[in-house]
Image (tube, grey):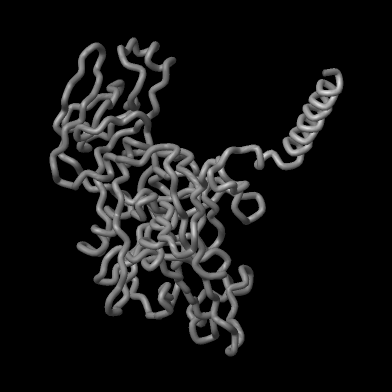
Amino acid sequence: MRRIWLVFSQTVTVVVAVLFVVGTFKPLWLNGSSSGSPLAGLVPVTVATHDAAVPAQPFTAAARLAAPAIVSVIASKAPRTEANTQNLDPWLRHFFGQRAAPQNAEPQVGLGSGVIVSTEGYLLTNNHVIAGADEIRVQLADGREADAKLVGTDPDTDVAVLKIDLPRLPAVTLGDIERLQVGDAVLAIGNPFNVGQTVTSGIVSALGRNGLGLSTFENFIQTDAAINPGNSGGALVDVNGNLIGINTAIYSRSGGSMGIGFAIPIDVARQVMDSLVKDGQVTRGWIGVQPRDLDAELAQNFKLPVNEGVLITGVLQDGPASQAGIKPGDVVLKIAGKAVHNTSQLMNSVAALKPQAEAVITVQRGDKTIDVPVKVGLRPKTAQRPSTDE
């Protein structure tokens, strides 16, 4: 009996030792399986293959839709020669360097980007991209090239409209700026540093940026999508590939992207384009007031029940606002039903009104809210009056 117990205990000890070794070095062998495979009992994993159809990512689809309509813009300016400088004042030529260039001097060339917004050949770009150019040439993403005709420019918004004549032109779809929100993903497409068409991604960092001194009417979309020299005039698109802005400027200490770029909202650019194509010029509304942002201190001093809006500090005598009965001390709350919260919004809203049309301006006068019908005037040239006069 003692001998049998000794054999049993030794057998159990050997079996336990074997199980320990197997469990340590080959744990998969301990998983039960009718096939005896060491992979039995594992959770199945699906492995993608190159033959499987992989759905495109949102950025991929957006870039694919918009990129064909984004072009490179080459603006050339002929050098001054004796033939085209002989009418300059000799004193100016001598003291300010306005002298003739050598006859074989190379033309000055500026590079930028543009966006085809119509299959008829209309393009949007920046005014500063083509300003002063004697010749403008456009290179399409598909390799085609064409000379561009300048339809018109609007320095007040830094928008220019070009037209090319080519068949089967791609055109980008215009987006809805009212749906754009801070945090939305966007793509910037253009030709930075003339390296070729480039797509960068980011988000909408802010909306309604103004007071930057870039143009008269500022209502910029701010983005951290990389924008560099050469991107000016290019597209800012949403994840659906719709055009929401025209890239126009960057904040930079080095000349390259620092994550702060600005784009002209497409609704502003479209208004300018429609005016330039239809009338050859941009006409803007004007009511003849001196506006100022309303803050809490001013609201308290004037004993106003509102703390948002635009305070009217002056009214031009016999101007549209004066004739309609708007007075200094009134606070503009809405223009044509659209709320205004600061001077920049008031300027843009008034400018968007059609001259000679009637618009309702809602003002706060003391403790009363009043709707004032105003016959809109034509905005005078900027040089003829202070820029703060609306």
Q: Position of residue 183 (x, y in %)?
A: 45, 38
Q: Position of residue 204 (x, y in %)?
A: 45, 42
- The answer to which of 277 and 328 lies nearer the viewer is 277
Question: Is residue 351 visible in this depiction of the protein?
Answer: yes
Q: Is residue 37 left or right of residue 181?
A: right
Q: Position of residue 180 (x, y in %)?
A: 35, 41
Q: Is residue 137 left or right of residue 270?
A: right
In the rendered view, tell whether residue 189 sits above or below residue 207.
Answer: below
Question: Is residue 136 visible in this depiction of the protein?
Answer: no
- The answer to which of 238 and 304 lies nearer the viewer is 238
Residue positioned 39% across, 43% down in the render: 219
Q: Is residue 359 left or right of residue 290?
A: left
In the rendered view, tell whether residue 175 sits above or below residue 14.
Answer: below
Res. 166 image quadrant: bottom left
Q: Is residue 363 left or right of residue 107?
A: left
Residue positioned 43% across, 57% down in the render: 54
In the rendered view, tell whether residue 53 sits above or below residue 387.
Answer: below
Q: Position of residue 226 (x, y in %)?
A: 55, 53
Residue positioned 59% across, 85% down in the render: 105
Residue positioned 79% across, 25% down in the render: 8
Rendered-image quadrant of the N terminus = top right
- The answer to which of 53 and 87 lies nearer the viewer is 53
- The answer to which of 60 and 188 lies nearer the viewer is 60
